[in-house]
Amino acid sequence: MNLPDRHTGTIAVTGMAMGLLGVMLAYWGNPENSGICISCFMENSVGALGLHDNARLQYLRPELPGFVIGAVLSAIAAREFRPRGSSAPMLKFFAGLFLIVGCAIFIGCPIKLLLRLTAGDLTAVAGMAGLAAGVWTGLTALGRGVELGEQKPEGSLNGILVPALFCLLLLFIFIRPSFLALSNEGSSARHAPLIASLGSGLLLGVLAQRSRFCITGSMRDIILMGRRAPQLIGLAAFVTAAVCASLVTGGFHLSLYGQPGAHLEYLWSFLGMGLVGWISVLFGGCPFRQLIKAGEGDVDAGLMVLGMVMGGALVQAWGIAATAAGVPLNGKMALLAGFAFILLISLMYRRRCTR
Amino acid sequence: MQNDTYDRLLWIGIALVVAAIAILPFVQANDSTQSAARLLGRANDRQAIVEARRYLLRQRYEPVESLLQQGRPQQALLKLEELSRTFPGDAHAFILRGQILADLGAPAEAASSFAQGIRLDGSYVDKTSPLSRRYAISRLVDGIRAKTAASSAGTASASPEMAQNLRYLQSRLAGGCE
């Protein structure tokens, strides 16, 4: 019997921790099925900073700075903090923005997609199919020569700025400046205790930096390598831990209807996650992975994170985000604009063979 | 650029997406009301907050207003001090104090109080705001300017703090971006 190597073990531990903490954070106080959701956290946090006016979605989620700072500490300890970046910065910014648009249409990032599925939310099946289709489409694009430039070392200040921004957010959590808006009602009024949120964020930041584990990256590797992909073990650990934790905490409800934070517009769920999968493969990771890479000094990921910040504000301010009532027209238009964006990138950033 | 099958597929994809963006608003005209309703709901919330604030201010400072109507400005000022201890940093209290002090003939103190209030809430100099005290503030500023202009030293004769408040109030009355 072949024992898994150390890296595979780290991936398995990361997957298990993510699945377990994803459920437990919801049990400790975060909204149902939203123990970990980067897009929801982003919308909450930018709302708290005053970037949108939805009074029900304003809370500076400690998990976000936890992820980034955990990744920074881990990268520094492993001597992997390397500021680096490539060309086309505006593409990265808008890719980050459209990542959040895709997530907002589905109501959740790829991590929440799995958390919803493992809690018995059958509406998330459409999103899962969309994410797989998006990852496959992105891989096809890469195979056909779409590339966004090679990364080169950057000046250290470039890599420090986004982690510094998240350190500032962490400081805001403790000193609570007067400009910070905090919801008294709605999903943002519900949150796990600070120590649990921040501790989980830091732990997952460290583990994800060491293992490079993320949901779309795992799907990409599984499509490419099949059963040989170590990420398969990570995904299996995630699903097993999340299902067990959901069953134990009483959060498992197998049904198509009445699921928390879910709508029944399957086509748009499919397309939303499809866009997320496609962008994630072309730009090197889902929203969570972008946060971790930003913590490693990756300037491209940092720009995507800034785009995600802008996306978090716009999906609320412009009425783009879907709710349990369905996907608004503004959301559908924004999602289609996202597809136009990624199609144009695929067309214009393609290296063609010359005969 | 050499177009192959993949390029053609991408072009078709772009054409489909553009067509969908153009058609969608007509196909789902009723759906737009859902989105619009959410945004309108927030506008209604904002309006409700404004109206509730106005109502609360009327209720809170009703004793002060009633003392003023009875012609007892000193007592009104004392009542205002009492309320300010309960609700510190309330712009409306500064504005009311400014009005009372102006009527009592203390223009420097009135200007200072008006300036503090407007720094907290600019709606008191807006022409259209229901809370507007533009006329009273403008009258005070004009009075002080006329008095200082009559003195040989002009604005320079006023204390630095008063001059600063006066210029601030003048600037806010003149409008422009905040």
Image (tube, rainbow, N blue to C red):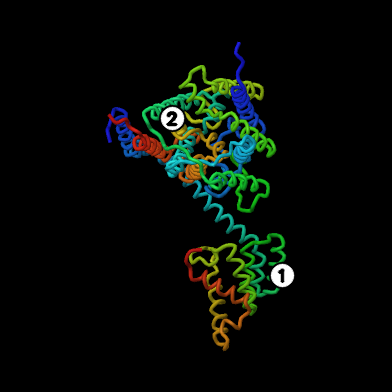
Question: What residue is rendered at 54% in x and 83% in y?
Answer: B146
**Quadrant of the rendered image containing residue A3:** top right
Task: Kindly report the distance in space between the C-alpha atoms of the residues bearing marks 1 and 2.
Answer: 66 Å
Seen in the picture, residue A108 relative to A245 is either above or below; the reply is below
Residue at the extreme bottom of the image, as rendered? B152
Q: Position of residue A283 (x, y in %)?
A: 46, 35
Q: Does A188 sit above or below residue B58? A: above
State which quarter of the image contains the N terminus of chain B: top left
- Answer few, some or many: residues within 10 Å of disc 1's Cα (few below 14, many 20 plus, some between 14 and 19): few
Above or below, comparing residue A278 to residue A162 in the picture: above
The reply, left or right, for residue B163 in relation to residue A221 is right
> Which secondary structure lies at badge 1?
helix
User: Residue A275: x and y, percent?
Assistant: 43, 33
Q: Which mark is residue A128?
A: none
Q: Is residue B41 visible?
A: yes
- Residue mark closest to the camera, 1 vs 2: 2
Residue type, numbered disc 2: Gly
Q: Could you tell me the amino acid type at mark 1?
A: Leu
Res A39 visible: no
* Residue A83, quarter of picture: top right
Residue A272: percent from left, percent from top: 44, 32
Label 2: which residue? A274
Q: Chain of mark 2?
A: A
